Amino acid sequence: DLPDLLYHARNGPLLGRYFEEDEKSLLLRENFLNMDCDAAMRVIRPTIRSFDSTGAFEYLQPSTLALQPTRVLLVDHGSMLTLWIGNAVAGPVHETLRRTCIDEAFRIALSRCPIPPVLQISAGSEGEKNLVHCLNPGHRDSREEQLTDFPTIHDEDREAVCSRLRGYAIVDYSEREYFRSIFRRR
């Protein structure tokens, strides 16, 4: 678990290349030193609660492979909650599912101080690009490695995620690529 945490710390809002010197980032770093362990872990490694089209709930790894079209994701970065809505559950038929997820996001946000913002984004939107950069780009791994991380993912969902995200300019290594590159240097 330590290598996983180190990878996410390197790419996350505290140490990663995408952190900025704005007031929110400085405040996050200051608050991080005073957070309880659970809150600090969410800032380092976001948690993902996934709701599929049937309403089933599960925790997933913080990977781009979680961005499957049949899911609604609640991504908890500690300082921000992001509700991501897949294409297959964006229609009016799934309004109840989305409403339940939004209510859960606000329930979590209101239990914290300071209250984090709740963002709602959908597949293919501008906000999705920012979310992708906060997750492990697992869509870059081989099919076998992807199935190891997400054994329940269907091939059509995996292909949909991979083909959609190939268009993004992701320069980060996936977690596996990162550790392979470290061991090649030696």
Image (cartoon, grey):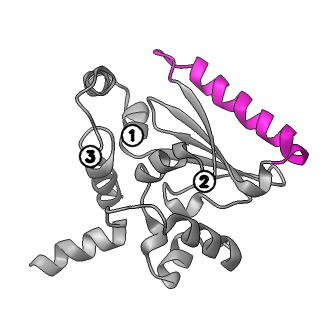
Q: Residues within 10 Å of mark 3 (few under 14, many from 20)?
A: some
Q: Position of residue 164 (x, y in %)?
A: 57, 66
Q: Residue 137 sits in which quadrant?
A: bottom left
Q: Position of residue 31 (x, y in %)?
A: 31, 22
The quadrant of the image that shows the C terminus is bottom left
* Identity, as a three-letter code, of the amino acid under mark 3: Gly
Quote the CA–CA distance across marks 1 and 3: 15 Å
Determine the residue positioned at 72% across, 37% down.
101
* Identity, as a three-letter code, of the amino acid under mark 2: Gly
Foreground label between 2 and 1: 2
Residue range of the region highlighted in magenta in the rendering: 91-116
Q: Position of residue 79 (x, y in %)?
A: 44, 29
Q: Residues within 10 Å of mark 1 (few under 14, many from 20)?
A: some
Q: Earlier in the sequence, mark 1 or mark 3?
A: 3
Quote the CA–CA distance across marks 2 and 3: 24 Å
Q: Which mark is residue 124?
A: 2
> As displayed, is residue 181 above or below residue 167?
below
Is 162 situated left or right of 173 in this image? right
Question: Secondary structure beneath disc 3?
Answer: loop
Determine the residue positioned at 32% across, 66% down.
173
Foreground label between 2 and 3: 2
Q: Position of residue 118 (x, y in %)?
A: 58, 28
Q: Earlier in the sequence, mark 2 or mark 3?
A: 3
Q: Which residue is mark 3?
A: 16
Q: Is residue 105 magenta?
A: yes
The quadrant of the image that shows the N terminus is bottom left
* Identity, as a three-letter code, of the amino acid under mark 1: Met
Q: Which residue is mark 1?
A: 41
Q: Residues within 10 Å of mark 2 (few under 14, many from 20)?
A: few
Determine the residue positioned at 46% across, 15% down.
114
> As displayed, is residue 10 above or below residue 32?
below
